[in-house]
Amino acid sequence: MREGEQQPTATIHEAERFAERMGYHWMECDTKELPVDLLIFKHESAGVVTVRKCQYRFFMPCIRSTRTHKGVDPTYGTGSMAPQPAAGKTASQLMAATMVATMIGIFTGIYLLFVNAGLAFRVLAVFLVGIVGTLSFLRHSVYYRSDQARMGWTQEHPEFQLEVGYANLAIGIAAFAAAILDWGSLACGITLFIYGTYLFCTFSLHLRQAIATDDSNHPGLRQRAIRSTINSGFFVTVLYIFAFLAIVRAG
């Protein structure tokens, strides 16, 4: 920090709380010879933290690693851990399976709409909500470490990830029940609409990231957010269209 520059006290306190949530103990550092804000440590690892407030963001901050004492010299901010492609392999495969299930569901559903509309909405509910929701549950809640690596960040308290997975599973189970037990087009349409609304919220988040992200501080983050915005926007549109058609048919 340059001489005369005001220390970002509120942001440092935020960094302290975040470090605690990640399982670190911390100590504030006010020694001029060591120009950092915090010393953090746990078990056999330790590091130093320099706090920088870039801009207000809608997504979670993290401790970003740049080099290590055992490998780690973290900087607190809105950033990401260096991606680990090998560690994220399982999550990437599950994501690919999700895309395959989505395309199978869309094309099969469109074909069946001209043959047997009732069956079409059941198939759409199974593939676009049931299977996709179950795969998302596995990615978020079972292989959450791999999913973190796939997205290029880490979090030692993944409860929010687990909750996201449980939400996907709950909606997916409802879709399976509506389709397998033949509750009718209205029930299938409602599951499509609910899942579409849930994912519309994630679309809004990705869009906010794509607009707000500064690539000069976080290389590649904006491109990732733009891809996520396009993918989620397409899927939400498809879910809403089929939900509308199912509800109109049940009308």
Image (spheres, rainbow, N blue to C red):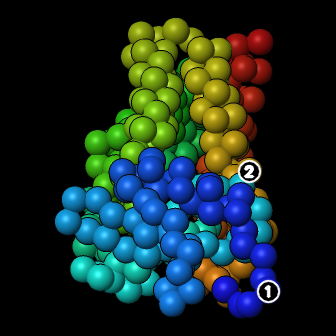
Task: Using the image, tell me which numbered label, if any, was put on residue 83.
Answer: none
Tell which tag, 2 or 1, sits nearer the viewer: 1
Q: Secondary structure at mark 1?
A: loop
Q: Amino acid at mark 1?
A: Gly
Tell me: residue 251, above or below residue 158.
Answer: above
At x 62%, y 56%, the residue is: 13
Task: Using the image, tell me which numbered label, if any, was put on residue 204.
Answer: 2
Placement of the C terminus among the 4 image quadrants: top right
User: In the visual, does 130 lie left or right of 191?
Assistant: left
Q: Amino acid at mark 2?
A: Ser
Tell me: residue 48, above or below residue 162.
Answer: below
What is the crowding at mark 1: few (fewer than 14 residues within 10 Å), some, or many (at least 20)?
A: few
Image location (x, y in percent) of residue 218 = 60, 80
Contact between marks 2 and 1 (CB within 8 A): the answer is no
At x 29%, y 49%, the residue is: 143
Tell me: residue 146, above or below residue 178.
Answer: below
Quadrant of the rendered image containing residue 1 = bottom right
User: In the visual, does 32 lie left or right of 132?
Assistant: right
User: In the visual, does 145 lie left or right of 118?
Assistant: left
At x 42%, y 10%, the residue is: 181
At x 43%, y 30%, the residue is: 166
Q: Where is mark 1, residue-wise?
A: 4
Q: Secondary structure at mark 2?
A: helix
Image location (x, y in percent) of residue 118 = 56, 21
Return the residue nearer the eye: 189 or 167: 167
In primary-sequence order, the first of circles 2 and 1 is 1
Return the residue nearer the eye: 237 or 246: 237
Quadrant of the rendered image containing residue 240 = top right
Q: CA distance from mark 2 to mark 1?
A: 40 Å
Residue 111 seen from this side: no
What is the crowding at mark 2: few (fewer than 14 residues within 10 Å), some, or many (at least 20)?
A: some
